[in-house]
Amino acid sequence: RTLALPRRQYFSFRREARVLDRVVRQDGGKAYGLLFRASTFAGEFCESLGAFLAREPRVASVAVVGGLGPGAADDAAGLFAAPPDAPRATALAYLVGSLPLSVAAVTLDRALGRDGLQILGILLRTAEQRRSAAC
C-alpha cells in the first residue's frame, strides 16, 4: 500500500507520523510506502521523517515527486526551503543517504538537481558499503 500525503509545505513530519503510526498498527503486518507529490520541505522535516522511518520498519518505500513547474529539479529552486547560501535539495539527498535499512526502495522523480544527485551518489555508495558490512 502506498500512502499519498497531502500536497503542501512540510515543516515537520511529527503530526503525520502520529496518524500513520495508528494506520500502520491497525492494519497489521502489511508493508507501506509514502508518496510526497509536489510538496516542499523545510524546518525539521528531514529529522522527523527519519525518526518515523527508523521506528516504523513496515514503511518500506519512499517516493518524492517534484512539481511540474520551472526549476522543479534545480537546487536553487528545489523542494527544500533553506538559507540562501545552502543548496535546497541537498537535504533530501542526505535524508535518503541516512534512511534505515528497512526502507528498501526510494523514488526521486524531478526531486534533485545536479548538486543533490552528486551528494546522493556519494551517500548511496557509503550506504551500500554499510549494508554489505551488516550482512
Image: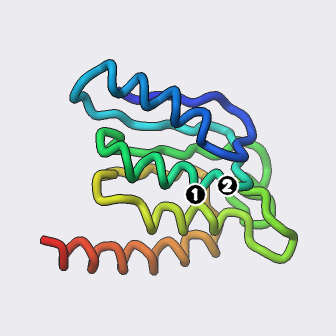
Q: Residue at x 46, y 28 (%)?
A: 3
Name the one closer to the observer, 117 or 88: 88
Q: Residue at x 74, y 71 (%)?
A: 87
Q: Which residue is mark 2?
A: 44
- The location of residue 35, given as percent across then percent down, is 50, 36
| Viewport quadrant of the N terminus | top left
Left or right of 8 on screen, residue 28:
left
Outermost residue toward the left? Answer: 135
- The location of residue 71, given as percent across then percent down, is 77, 55
The answer to whether the residue labelled 1 contacts the one labelled 2, judged by CB atoms less than 8 Å apart, is yes
Q: Which residue is mark 1?
A: 47
Outermost residue toward the top? Answer: 26
Residue type at mark 1: give it.
Glu
Name the one closer to the observer, 68 or 125: 125
Residue type at mark 2: give it.
Glu
Q: Is residue 56 above or below residue 19?
A: below
